[in-house]
Amino acid sequence: MTDHDHYNDDDIAEILQETRTIALVGASPKADRPSFGVMQYLLSRGYTVIPVNPGQAGKEILGQKVYARLSDIPDEIDMIDVFRAPEFLGEVVAEALALKTRPQVIWGQLSVRDDVAVEPAEEAGITVVMDRCPAIEIPRLGL
């Protein structure tokens, strides 16, 4: 069981350096929403970012096609970045575990944390990071 109160900087750096494709769950087309800014930042850093939002499915956010759910994404994903309230984290974990090819990482954004909800993912070998933001960690770690 991971200690979700403390993450090793080297582990976070390794995740961010090995990740190429990110499914961003809870993506918003609104420029004033944190998910929009983080998606924009990750795209600018060369990541492939696939927005997931049932209400926006079929549309585009920042030029990227939006999917309704993780299972609709045709590409393999390395990381799921979760911009949903903590009570939805279990749902995201269940969806991730149902994928034919599972992601290596589930990342809960700032304030997105539910230690019990992520246990099945960790038991399945998926790395979980919670209550952190890649757009903060990348510059902080000098990546």
Image: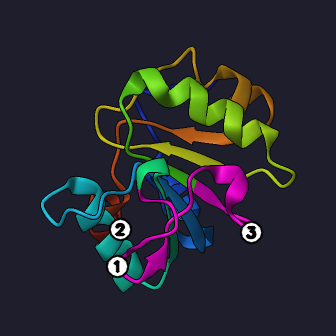
Assess whether mark 2 and mark 1 are in contact (beta carbons under 8 angstroms).
yes
Task: Using the image as rendered, state which of residue 1 and residue 61 is in the foreground.
Answer: 61
Marking on residue 33: none
Q: Does residue 35 show up magenta in the picture?
A: no
Residue ID for mark 2:
39
Task: Using the image as rendered, state which of residue 27 and residue 114 is in the foreground.
Answer: 27
**Residue 96 to residue 61: above or below:** above
Circle 1 packing at 10 Å, graded few (<14), some (14-19), many (20+), is some
Q: Residue 47: image x %, image y %?
A: 50, 78
Seen from this angle, which residue lies furthest left? Answer: 32
Tell which circle, 1 or 3, labels the residue nearer the N-terminal end. Answer: 1
Tell which circle, 3 or 2, labels the residue nearer the N-terminal end. Answer: 2
Residue ID for mark 3:
74
Residue ID for mark 1:
62
Q: Amino acid at mark 1?
A: Leu
Q: Does residue 74 show up magenta in the picture?
A: yes
Whole-angstrom CA distance, mark 1 to mark 2, is 8 Å
Say whether residue 140 is visible. Answer: no
Per the image, label 1 sits on a secondary structure element best described as: loop
Residue 7 falls in which quadrant of the image?
A: top left
Whole-angstrom CA distance, mark 1 to mark 3, is 19 Å
Q: Residue 122: image x %, image y %?
A: 70, 30
Which image quarter is the N terminus in? top right
Whole-angstrom CA distance, mark 3 to mark 2, is 19 Å
Q: Closer to the observer: label 1 or label 2? A: 1
Circle 2 packing at 10 Å, graded few (<14), some (14-19), many (20+), is many
